[in-house]
Image (cartoon, rainbow, N blue to C red):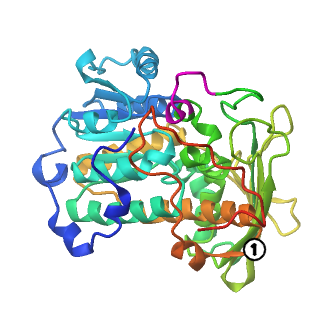
Amino acid sequence: MNPSDFNRRKFLGVTGATLAVAGFPSIVRGQDVTKKVLKIGLIGCGGRGTGAASQALSADPDVKLWAMGDAFAPAITNSLNQLSQFGRVEVPEERRFSGLDAFQQVLNSGVDVVILATPPGFRPQHLRAAVEAGKHIFCEKPMAVDVAGVKSVMESAKLAKEKNVSIQHGFCWRYAPGVREAYGKITSGELGRVISIYGTYMGTPPKPLQPGMKKPDGMGDVEWQVAWWNNFEWLSGGPIQEQAIHTVDKISWAMGDVAPIAAVANGGRAMRNDAGNVYDHYNVVFEYPNGVLCHFGERQYPGLYGEVIDRVYCEKGTVICPSAPMVLGLDGKKREWMYRPQDGAEQNMYQVCHNEFFAALRKGETINTGEYMAKSTMLGILGREAAHTGERITWEQLWNAGQDMAPDTLKFPDAFPIAPVPVPGVYKLV
């Protein structure tokens, strides 16, 4: 999960004309994917990567898991043990790659489709490399952790269009049948104009460092931080990006994926007291055109009340999602509509995502969701940066920022000091 030759700073200077010339034959152009057995490469073998691989294997009978890569070899073994139930797992020792360059080895192993599920700090670089290699891509959320990363993703999406390479995203709630139907009532205008939104993602911290935990003697800074990546902003983007980005994405979805104006926010560390530098709660107000204010509340508090609920207030009713999607009347009580699952229809949103991805590949259709998946990622960064700075940050300011949290050339033994926990009024958006 580390770059070899690629540096995203260099890539951001490439012109569109250069990108158009750079193409390799894509899978769609060069091979008949409507008939061939597709070889899948898994890059990032943790829980989400393993889940995505199982969904890919379930989506199409003519796919096989061909190669796997992770920063740490034990993760590959654990993932293989979980995926052994599938008869189409053909990953011998020579196609199991560990270390920070594992992604490139997977891409070079003869795969047709790759699943990108490493810590998101590596996502822009891996996406670029996969597009350049002409592989179709499932790209897990979020797509970046900083401004430079989002800009890189946007350029990779442009390159993918030139090469007929498909990019499918991991904003899974957009594939939940009930949520889709409910949000369809919003985006179609059936419920009138969106007046306001309150979305929550209140959960518990994944794999938190414990107070007092320190890097073991003899281990490099980078290796230790990658092992505990959720706790470090340059790898995870913080809880808004790594976990609650789903709620942020649904705010964008309900607003028609238009650009916001600005955000104001607050946040901090109320319960965390560890060596990491991520906050454990945020409250954000996104300002949209026509006076629409979208509120977002996130926290990672262990053992306390939790909820993940979208409340989208429209002129003709209120949509409540994602569990038991429904529309309430203007009194906020009468149920005007509730989702009724169709008999026999796939309801698992993760599976629907992969079913549609592979069905499109078999038809020779190119999916490219790069632009809006980058914008949703940037929306999360907007809220985070407003909280960290204590300032009102505009969408334009953010896109003009040069924020880049880490170089693309880090290796496990490298020294890489942990950035201070952001203090509003002191921390600045670069």
Most foreground residue, 32 or 275 = 275
Left or right placement of residue 122 versus residue 267 in this view = left
Q: Residue 220: say if magenta.
A: yes
Q: Which residues are magenta?
A: 215-224
334 to 171, vertically: above or below: below
| x, y percent for residue 352 | 46, 43
Left or right placement of residue 64 versus residue 332 in this view = left
Q: Can residue 50 be spotted in the picture?
A: yes
Q: Amino acid at mark 1?
A: Leu
Give the residue at x 75% y 64%.
426
| x, y percent for residue 126 | 36, 47
Residue found at the very far bottom of the displayed protein: 290
Q: Can residue 197 be spotted in the picture?
A: no
Res. 314 image quadrant: bottom right
Most foreground residue, 243 or 430 = 430
Q: Residue 430: say if magenta.
A: no
Give the residue at x 66% y 54%.
247
| x, y percent for residue 294 | 73, 69
Most foreground residue, 92 or 394 = 394
273 to 201, vertically: above or below: above
197 to 106, vertically: above or below: below
260 to 210, vertically: above or below: below
Quarter of the image with the C terminus in it: bottom right
Left or right placement of residue 306 versus residue 369 in this view = right
Q: SS of the residue at dot 1?
A: strand
Q: Residues within 10 Å of mark 1 (few under 14, many from 20)?
A: some
Quarter of the image with the N terminus in it: top left
Give the residue at x 44% y 28%.
45
Residue identified by numbered label 1: 293
Res. 189 image quadrant: bottom right
Res. 427 image quadrant: bottom right
| x, y percent for residue 375 | 51, 66
